[in-house]
Amino acid sequence: MTTDDPLHPHSHDPNPEPPSDDPTLLLALTDGRTHPIPLPTLQQLPRTTMPHCFIISTGHGTSGPFAFTGVTLHDFAQVYIAGEWSHLEVISGDGFGCRVWANEAKETLLAWGIDGRTLTRREGLVRLIVPSEQDDALRQVKWVAEIRVRLT
């Protein structure tokens, strides 16, 4: 694994501005097909709220607790991914990303809401929330733009 791999946990500079104006999430399947998933479609998936979550931001410390609302990666996968998968690569519009293993999917959230309201574009619009994270924002992905399905 190389250190320049955007999916290898690493420190990164905070990005306070959205990397693009396009909020559409792109799902990349193992067969090469892609599916755009607009925010209203994501919001129609089974809804989960995870209370007592924190935003850990490189260089800005920790804020919260917040109650994040969205869809677990497990429920997302049940709707969009046929068959087995080992992990998902969750990539931000600014290129930062992380891997989420299938056994973590029930406890990991694609959040589009915070404390009873929709996240703004500046707040991330869709964020990956990994409540178990204790490191310096190594698994928190703001402005989720792409999810890549992987078999191994």
Image (cartoon, grey):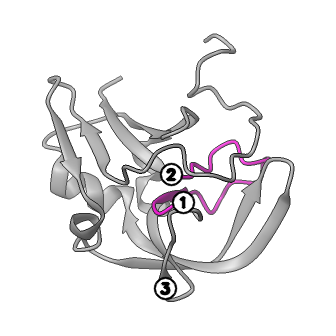
Reading the chain from its start, which is encountered first: label 1 or label 3?
Answer: 3
Vertical relation: 110 (above or below) 58:
below
Q: Residue furthest bottom?
A: 116
Task: Assign the C terminus to one quadrant of the image.
Answer: top left
| Residue segment shown in magenta | 124-142
Residue identifier under label 1? 124
Vertical relation: 39 (above or below) 65:
above
Residue identifier under label 2? 143
x and y, in percent, of residue 76 in the image:
28, 57
| Secondary element type, mark 3 | strand
Reading the chain from its start, which is encountered first: label 3 or label 2?
Answer: 3
x and y, in percent, of residue 150 in the image:
32, 28
Q: Please report the residue visible at 70 percent of the width from the left and 64 percent of the height from the top.
A: 55
- Mark 1 and mark 2 in contact (Cβ < 8 Å)? yes
Res. 97 image quadrant: top right
Callout 3 environment at 10 Å: few (<14), some (14 to 19), or many (20+)?
few
Q: Is residue 129 magenta?
A: yes
x and y, in percent, of residue 37 in the image:
23, 53
Front-lying residue, 137 or 126: 126
Callout 2 environment at 10 Å: few (<14), some (14 to 19), or many (20+)?
many
Q: Is residue 133 magenta?
A: yes
Vertical relation: 144 (above or below) 109:
above
Q: Please report the residue visible at 50 percent of the width from the left and 51 percent of the height from the top.
A: 143
Residue identifier under label 3? 117
Reading the chain from its start, which is encountered first: label 2 or label 1?
Answer: 1
